[in-house]
Image (cartoon, rainbow, N blue to C red):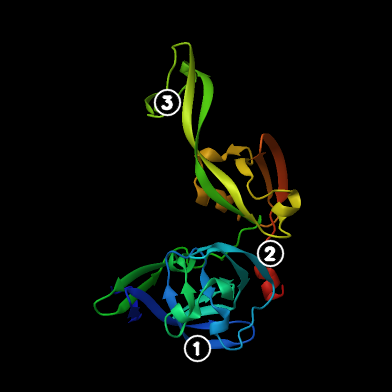
Amino acid sequence: MDKYDSFPLILENDRVYTQAHIETKEKRFENQKLLLDLGNSNPMMLFQRQLSLYVISPPYIREYLGMGFNGAVFGYKNRIKSLRWAKYVVEYPIVAYPDSNSYDPVKISKNRVGSIGNQILSRFHVILDYPNQRIYLRVNKNFHKPYVVDMSGLEIVHDGFEFVRHRMLYQDMGENERMEGRTIVFSTQVNYLIELHATYIVNQVRPNSPAEQAGIQIGDQILKINGRMVGKMKLQDIKAKLQSGEGKRIKMQIRRGDKELNISFELEDPLSLQTYKGV
């Protein structure tokens, strides 16, 4: 434990909370109670109306934030200047603000103003000592990586699986493919590789985003990204491509009904660090 920093945690109803300072362009909020939430994919989430005189500073975007108990949750995202947690300063994290009608303030733990999500927690080695109510932190190699938002405007979700059949000669099949349990050989002359591919569809499209302007719609099935079939890709790999950098061109093949369409657009960062810093 010598390389870790230790400080108190708050344990309530088997949930872990901590205190940290939140600094925006306009104001500093001291000793705010935040849930440590590994299930939250955002770096941070704040309940705006739980913080007196809190202003969501521009630039900001409005988009789908995820699923809640009452259905889809929408809200805003922006950057703040910093989160000061123990001795650590997390600079310019992206913060999600769910609409006030998506949660019941009465059911929120007393004095809680939001959450620290897994994009921040993943930048630390974290040890939770429940009996002694202590948390141990040590930064890892990801600590200084910038926080990024989807630059396409797409929310893509996994939508099951489908079988894809490839016609190929036996001698063209690699040893792994011959031994793979998903391979079915119908003859010794002409063979078919049958693979189980994941299917991904567009669940949400952010208004005025590059994807919306290119014509992508909710319900479109993604077939290829930059020439690569997405059926063998993990969802996080697809999302990484859509966060790969300002100005990068994305070429997509999609299925809409019984039609296959080719669409391209350039990624655009709506919460650019340079814009926030005024560079």
Q: Dot 3 surroundings within 10 Å: few (below 14), some, or many (20 or more)?
A: some
The crowd level at tag 2 (other Cα within 10 Å; few <14, some 14-19, many 20+) is: many
| Amino acid type, residue under disc 3 in the picture | Thr
Residue 222 in picture, x, y percent from top left = 61, 43
Q: Give the residue furthest to the left.
A: 131
Mark identifier at residue 115: none
Question: What's under tag 1, amino acid-wise?
Answer: Glu
Reply above or below: 136 against 123: below
- Disc 1 designates what residue? 30
* SS at mark 3 in the image: loop
Disc 1 versus disc 3: distance between alpha carbons?
Answer: 59 Å
| Closer mark to the observer between disc 3 and disc 2 | 3
From the image, tell me which residue sits under label 2.
Answer: 270
- Give the foreground label among 1 and 3: 3
**Which of pointers 1 and 3 lies earlier in the amino acid sequence?**
1
What residue is drawn where x is 74% and y is 49%?
214
Instruction: Using residue 263 as the reference point, say whether residue 142 is left or right of it.
Output: left
Q: Which callout, 2 or 1, points at the residue further toward the start of the chain?
A: 1
Residue 242 in sight from this viewpoint? no
Q: Give the image location of residue 38, x and y in percent.
A: 42, 65
Number of residues whose C-alpha sits closer than 10 Å to that of mark 1, classed few (under 14), some (14–19) or many (20 or more): few
Decide if residue 44 is on the left or right side of residue 275.
left
Left or right: residue 77 compared with residue 67:
right
Looking at the rendered structure, the secondary structure element under dot 1 is strand
Instruction: Look at mark 3 in the image and give the residue it sits on.
Output: 183
- Residue farthest toward the front in the current orientation of the protein: 70
Task: State the image coordinates of residue 96 (x, y, percent, origin top left).
Answer: 57, 70
Q: What residue type is labelled 2?
A: Pro
Q: Is residue 62 visible?
A: yes
- Dots 2 and 1: beta carbons under 8 Å? no
